[in-house]
């Protein structure tokens, strides 16, 4: 599995967060209130690498030095190639693959500069 982060998304992430070498972008898959595991919603959360456990998987990420992780239990839900992008029209981050739009309005929780969502 691999993740590509577009330049537009990088700009938004950098404006919102001050990612350090010990931090990871975690694609959290939220299923509360969705009724089914495949009906979950992906959101992006900034975490410290020390908070990543053996239940998570670090994914090959381009460009470096960005690093992305997901929960192993939901790896099967995602396509082999993922793209984190930014939509100017929606003013939101997006999670997509070459085959589908996974979340066209993905929130981003950053704890380094603020606790507000993008």
Image: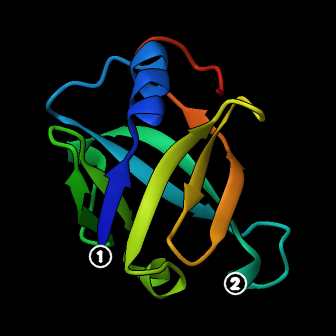
Quarter occupied by residue 59: bottom left
Q: Residue at image x 36%, y 39%?
A: 47
Specify which label sits upstream in the sequence, 1 or 2. Answer: 1
Please tell me how many numbered marks the rendered image carries.
Answer: 2
Give the answer, above or below, for where 28 lies relative to 112.
below
For residue 60, the mark is none
In the rendered image, the quadrant that contains the C terminus is top right
Does residue 71 sit above or below 72 in this rendering? above
Residue placed at 24% from the left, 55% from the top?
Answer: 61
Determine whether 34 is above or below 90 in the image: below
Q: Position of residue 67 (x, y in %)?
A: 24, 48
Q: Residue at x 58, y 64 (%)?
A: 29
Residue 20 position within the rendered picture, expressed as x and y whole percent measured from the top left: 21, 24
Q: Can you identify the residue that label 2 sits on? A: 38
- 77 vs 62, left or right, is right
Dot 1 and dot 2 residues touching (CB under 8 Å) = no
Q: Quadrant of the N terminus?
A: bottom left
Cα distance between the residues tagged 1 and 2: 18 Å
Residue labelled with disc 1 = 1
Q: Viewed as shown, does residue 16 lie left or right of 108?
A: left
User: Mark 1: few, some, or many residues within 10 Å (few <14, many ≥20)?
Assistant: few
> Is the residue marked by circle 2 packed among few (<14), some (14-19), or many (20+) residues within 10 Å?
few
Q: Secondary structure at mark 1?
A: loop
**Is 20 situated above or below 70?**
above
The colour scheme is rainbow
Is residue 42 left or right of 28 when viewed as pictured?
right
| Element on which disc 2 rests | helix
Name the mark nearer the viewer: 1 or 2: 1
Q: Residue at x 33, y 17 (%)?
A: 18
Residue 108 picture location, percent across and down: 57, 36
From the top left corner, tell me how far across and down residue 23 is, in percent: 25, 35
């Amino acid at each position: 599995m691999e993740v590509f982060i577009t330049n537009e998304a990088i700009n938004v992430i950098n404006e919102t967060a001050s990612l350090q070498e010990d931090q990871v972008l975690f694609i959290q898959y939220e299923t509360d209130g969705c009724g089914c595991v495949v009906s979950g919603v992906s959101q992006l959360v900034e975490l410290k690498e020390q908070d990543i456990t053996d239940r998570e998987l670090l994914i090959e990420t381009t460009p470096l030095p960005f690093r992305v992780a997901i929960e192993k239990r939901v790896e099967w839900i995602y396509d082999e190639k993922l793209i984190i992008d930014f939509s100017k029209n929606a003013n939101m981050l997006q999670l997509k693959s070459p085959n589908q739009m996974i979340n066209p309005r993905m929130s981003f929780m950053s704890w380094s500069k603020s606790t507000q969502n993008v």
